[in-house]
Image: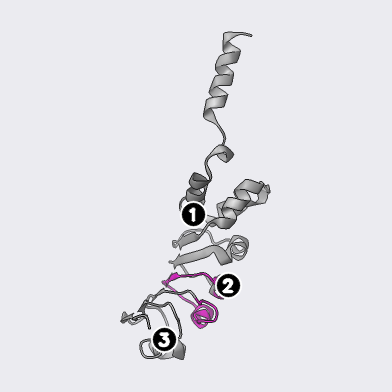
Amino acid sequence: MTEEYYLTNEINFSIGHFEQLPDEILLDLFENYIRLVDIYLGFYLLNHQRINRIINSARFYIDIPSKDIFHQKSFSHFAHQIVSLHLSTFCNDLDISKLVNLRFLHIEKPDRPQIVSIRPEFLPNLSYLSLSPCWYSLRELPRHLTNIGELCPFKHLRLCILPNGKTIRLVPK
């Protein structure tokens, strides 16, 4: 065999493959660096057992800036794994009531169905809620949100920022 053959094989061996990365690195990439739509379309549909197992163990921290893509199928598929959502754009297709493990929620332009979905039976683990000022008034908020300081129905909620800028800190019972 020629020297060129050994050199080519040595280079190919040293480059490696994505799926050869350790589980911890893959998990970090999926949770922090790759968009949910890209995980769904680029990795999950490959049907690679190890990669799918790692993806299924991930907890997703989603930030949808004003110009990002919202992909309904990926959100629906991974809804139970989303623990944080920062929504900076009007996104009326997003049903937040399906995000049962959500802990942190910030919505800059919530629509009426999203406001109504902020309920303890849909979001039992919610610990932080922030709603930016938008088109509706405080009296249009559901009662459980306007009276959240006196009678908080959320077991884990510790901080709530209402559309009027009022910050409510809740103490664990």
Mark 3 is on which residue type? Cys
Tag 3 residue: 152
Q: Count how many numbered circles sit on residues in the image.
A: 3
- The C terminus - image quarter: bottom left
Q: Earlier in the sequence, mark 2 or mark 3?
A: 2
Front-most of residues 129 and 120: 120
Q: Position of residue 153 (x, y in %)?
A: 45, 86
Colour convention: one colour
Q: Position of residue 29 (x, y in %)?
A: 49, 48
Front-most of residues 56 and 65: 56
Tag 1 residue: 31
Q: Residues within 10 Å of mark 1 (few under 14, many from 20)?
A: many
Distance from Cα at disc 2 to Cα at disc 1: 19 Å
Distance from Cα at disc 1 to Cα at disc 3: 31 Å
Front-most of residues 18 and 91: 18
Is 128 located above or below residue 15 in the figure?
below
Front-most of residues 40 and 15: 15
Is 84 located above or below residue 111 in the figure?
above
Q: Earlier in the sequence, mark 2 or mark 1?
A: 1
Tag 2 residue: 98
Q: Residues within 10 Å of mark 3 (few under 14, many from 20)?
A: some
Q: Is residue 49 left or right of residue 160?
A: right
Distance from Cα at disc 2 to Cα at disc 3: 21 Å
Q: Of discs 2 and 3, which sits in the foreground? A: 3
Quarter where residue 66 is shown: bottom left
Q: Earlier in the sequence, mark 1 or mark 3?
A: 1
Magenta segment boundaries in residue numbering: 97-124
